[in-house]
Amino acid sequence: MTIATRRLGTSGPQVSAVGLGAMGMSDLYGAADDAESIATLHAALDAGVNLIDTADFYGSGANELLIARALQERRREEVVLSVKFGSRRTPDGGFQPVPYDVSPAAVKDRLAYSLRRLNTDYIDIYRPARLNPDIPVEETVGALAEMRQAGYIRHIGLSEVGAATIRRAAAVAPISDVQLEYSLLSRGPETAIIPALRELGIGLTAYGVLSRGLLSGRWTRARRLGADDFRAHSPRFQGENLQANLRLVDALGRVAARLGATTSQIAIAWVTAQGQDIVPLVGARRRDRLAESLDAAGLVLDADALTEIEAAVPAGSAAGERYAAPLMATLDSER
């Protein structure tokens, strides 16, 4: 199978129609296997996936080091590295409960460390993970533009920002894409953000397309999560919310069966079908999960299939917010 390509906005790079999100290989979803993670990264590249997404705070830098190990025998030009910065960690593996550091000084400081950990002299797309309300987005984007002019980054991205902020940022420098959680269970961006992106010629990289595993078709009501798995604190995975969400997944699974695909493949293909300017990120940590996700790239959903899918999981039907209240408060995209 050949993975098609899409351009991230009018100013961004040409990337595979499906990207690989590497967070779970080092953080937040419980223990992972480095050897299998590296094998999965190799399998993705061999299949034609060139967009690899990470952040300097995933595993407190461990994720970048893992990716560097996986890429050491690859040509740098094969890969489009997308890196987020801004969140700060604590020695025990937690996150500091302080505003994101996206100041101009932090842009340059965090970039220096990422370049060293990734063993590269440039990053393809560099972006703040979230905004800090006390730091104007113009200052952050201005510093990113300086780093692009100096050749340390190729493109400027954003993450979890609203339409008004996107317009302010785009007035300072070209923006390649915005990362947003976008899935059958998270359709908030459709109201104002996606129209703004399309007006400005900015791409969307969609993360959480399987809603942290809810839409995989494998989640069970009896599954128990460890303390190091952030889903243990996510409202959508709690009590009656979980029961209601799994009823939606059951309905989606019945549609998937009629279409001859798995539930996760239908969820991924639905995101892909929402526009040529949207690139879903899949968070596979194992080769078998990657293969299943990449098979979704070949699924073509016609109008009848899309109608059936959205009848199974209607817009706004998800039970519970996607994050706990303190994290939701940090999201410019939800204001």
Image (spheres, rainbow, N blue to C red):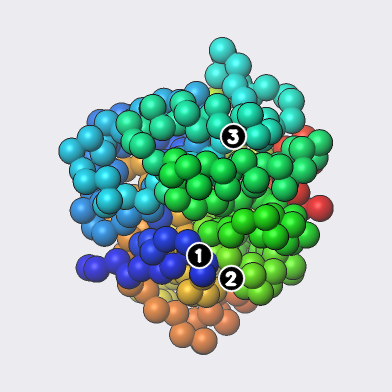
Foreground residue among 153 and 48: 153
Q: Is residue 94 left or right of residue 36?
A: right
Considering only order in the chain, which callout, 2 or 3, is on the residue closer to the N terminus? 3
Within-10-Å neighbours for mark 3: few <14, some 14–19, many 20+: many
**Residue 211 visible here:** no
Q: Is residue 276 left or right of residue 186?
A: left
Tell me: residue 154, above or below residue 285: below
Within-10-Å neighbours for mark 2: few <14, some 14–19, many 20+: many
Which residue is rendered at x = 39% and y = 27% of the image?
116
Foreground residue among 255 and 274: 274
Considering only order in the chain, which callout, 3 or 1, is on the residue closer to the N terminus? 1
Extreme residue in the front direction: 150
Tell me: residue 326, above or below residue 261: above
Within-10-Å neighbours for mark 1: few <14, some 14–19, many 20+: some
Examine the image and state in which quarter residue 262 appears.
bottom left
Amino acid at the residue labelled 2: Gly
CB under 8 Å between discs 2 and 1: yes
Q: Which residue is mark 3?
A: 107
Q: Which residue is mark 2?
A: 201
Amino acid at the residue labelled 1: Ser
CB under 8 Å between discs 1 and 3: no
Which residue is rendered at x = 74% and y = 57% of the image?
168
Extreme residue in the top direction: 91
Q: Position of residue 230 (x, y in %)?
A: 59, 33
Q: Position of residue 195 (x, y in %)?
A: 68, 72
Which element type, helix, strand or loop, lies under badge 2? loop
Q: Which residue is mark 1?
A: 11
Tell me: residue 262, above or below residue 240: below
Amino acid at the residue labelled 3: Val
